[in-house]
Amino acid sequence: MSTLIQIKQVTGRPIPLRGNDIDTDRIIPARYMKAITFDGLGQYAFFDARFEADGRSKGHVMDDPRYQAKGPRVGVVNKNFGCGSSREHAPQALLRWGIKALVGESFADIFFGNCVTLGIPCVTGNEADVAALLADVEDDPAHELKVDVAALTVTYRGKSYPVALPAGARTQLLEGTWDATRILLQAQDQVRQVAARLPYVAGFVR
């Protein structure tokens, strides 16, 4: 039986992604959405903001040596992050780059939902707190940032900020029910029983 993964806390090195209304086209350019799977998509996250046409680095924060770290990362953003196209490749690219949680002022609704289905908490704080957190991260990025889904707090360098998360999404993350595939796998016996009673799938159930 597949075990549900409960997400109560996410801890990782922070990456500041400043700017309001950063859309999904910027997060993952459309030309990199042709792959059959999402594997390897992380290398294309913010690609056009990071590189010139000839491949030279533009000095984007994702390539800044100060923000290079192994392990999970936590993105810190501003208003309306993930707006624009509803492409699920955007959170997939961020996840595969290493971002396991996001802290910001607000998130586009569809982007937020796509993040929850991947187990990426997107918590929101007020403008002043997010500004202070961004400044703190940029001043000294070499510390762990903790997103506490259960307590609804974000902590960095000893400072703690209150954050919000819709009740439904929070419950899904805490209980592990955000992962629809695992839920389905846990219910295999019930699925087979129901399928066996349906005349239009008779003979196809194994």
Image (spheres, rainbow, N blue to C red):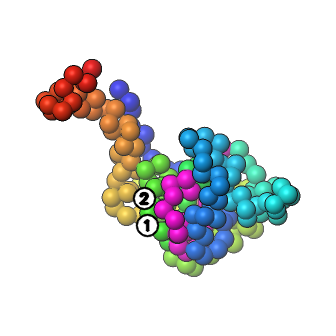
> Could you say which is closer to the camera, residue 153 or residue 196?
196
- Determine which quarter of the picture holds residue 176: top left
Decide: few, some or many residues near mark 2? Use Cα within 10 Å; few <14, some 14-19, many ≥20: some
Tell me the kind of residue under disc 2: Gly
Point out which mark residue 65 bears: none
Q: Position of residue 1 (x, y in %)?
A: 35, 26
Point out which mark residue 109 bears: 1
Between marks 2 and 1, how big is the CA–CA gap?
Answer: 6 Å
| Element assignment for label 2 | helix
64 relative position to 201: left or right: right
| Element assignment for label 1 | helix
62 relative position to 37: left or right: right
Q: Position of residue 102 (x, y in %)?
A: 55, 60
Q: Position of residue 40 (x, y in %)?
A: 65, 42
- Label 2, on which residue? 113
Quadrant including the C terminus: top left
89 relative position to 71: left or right: left
> Could you say which is closer to the camera, residue 108 or residue 141?
108
In the rendered image of this protein, does residue 200 appear above or below residue 44?
A: above
Q: Residue at x 85, y 57 (%)?
A: 54
Q: Position of residue 104 (x, y in %)?
A: 55, 68
Tell me if residue 94 can be seen: yes
> Could you say which is closer to the camera, residue 12 or residue 155?
12
In the rendered image of this protein, does residue 109 appear above or below residue 151?
A: below
Our reading of the magenta stretch's main secondary structure is loop
Magenta-drawn stretch contains 18: no
Magenta-tinted stretch: 71-90
